Image: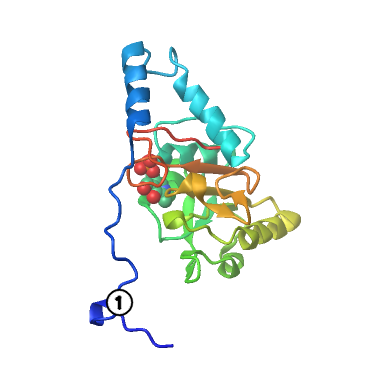
Amino acid sequence: MTAQLAIDGGAPIRREPFPEWPIFGNREEQLLLEVLHSGKWGELTGSKVVTFARDFAAFQGAAYGVCVPNGTLALEVGLEALGVGHADEIITTAYTFIATASSAFAVGARPIFVDIDPETNNIDPARIAAAITPRTKAIVPVHIGGQPADMDGVMEVASRRARTSPPARAASLSPTAASTTRWRGRCTTSGACRRAAGTSTSCSAGTCACPSGRAPS
Ligand SMILES: Cc1ncc(COP(=O)(O)O)c(C=O)c1O
């Protein structure tokens, strides 16, 4: 079967415009007003942040969740929790937002880039082994655009390395469509799938709770 691209006069696959983003309705409006009128706008006095962290962690099948101001900080907190620090290396991809790499620098580590697999647009597990050095402390796959990385492949390399030398742990950040991105039925941001994960809920992300509300788990 041959297909002509829509740009060349073929039938377009999508005929409707993409929906506006973010999507919201009366429920979001009511909840925002509830917080506004309560006068409890923060975690110290209000309950929404703690409730969100708990429910988001449960939704992912993760044991714990905590909200931090943004996805960038979620990554930094995750790396610190994994013991990544001065002179360590983390393995990730360059097809991502700058925070994936800058969070490594923020904890004193260095990002080492591995190319992506064109099938997933995410880190290619087959190329990770060649990037591992004695300084490797973590593998940080990104689930770009809501498309999950091959987590079986990533975890395989991480476990192999853990058997032979100090553990390479797998953290992950899924900046877009995070909460709905699943790999073999498990949430890609879930601790069930790896050691730690961070999620951005900025307006550019698929889990939008602007202005902020992000949970490493
Ligand atoms: C891959 C990736 N990492 C980290 C971030 C940073 O998230 P935030 O903007 O919430 O700090 C983003 C945001 O787009 C992202 O796409």
Residue at 32% of width from left, 42% of height from top?
22
Picture quadrant of residue 132:
bottom right
32 and 84: which one is in front? 32
Q: Give amino acid for label 1.
A: Ala
| Residue under numbered circle 1 | 11
Give left or right: position of 36 versus 94: left
Q: Quadrant of the N terminus?
A: bottom left
98 and 30: which one is in front? 30
- From the top left corner, tell me how far across and down residue 151 is, in percent: 60, 58
Give left or right: position of 171 versus 205: right
Q: Compared with residue 26, is residue 175 higher up or lower down, i.e. above or below?
A: below
Residue at 53% of width from left, 39% of height from top?
78
Q: Dot 1: few (<14), some (14–19), or many (≥20) neighbours within 10 Å?
A: few
- From the top left corner, tell me how far across and down residue 163 is, in percent: 75, 56
Residue 107 in view in this figure: no
176 and 99: which one is in front? 176
Label 1 residue SS: loop
Picture quadrant of residue 5:
bottom left
- From the top left corner, tell me how far across and down residue 80 is, in percent: 54, 38
Total residue callouts:
1
Residue at 28% of width from left, 77% of height from top?
6
Residue at 54% of width from left, 59% of height from top?
149
Q: Quadrant of the C terminus?
A: top right
- From the top left corner, tell me how far across and down residue 74 is, in percent: 47, 38
Give left or right: position of 75 versus 98: right
Give left or right: position of 156 versus 52: right
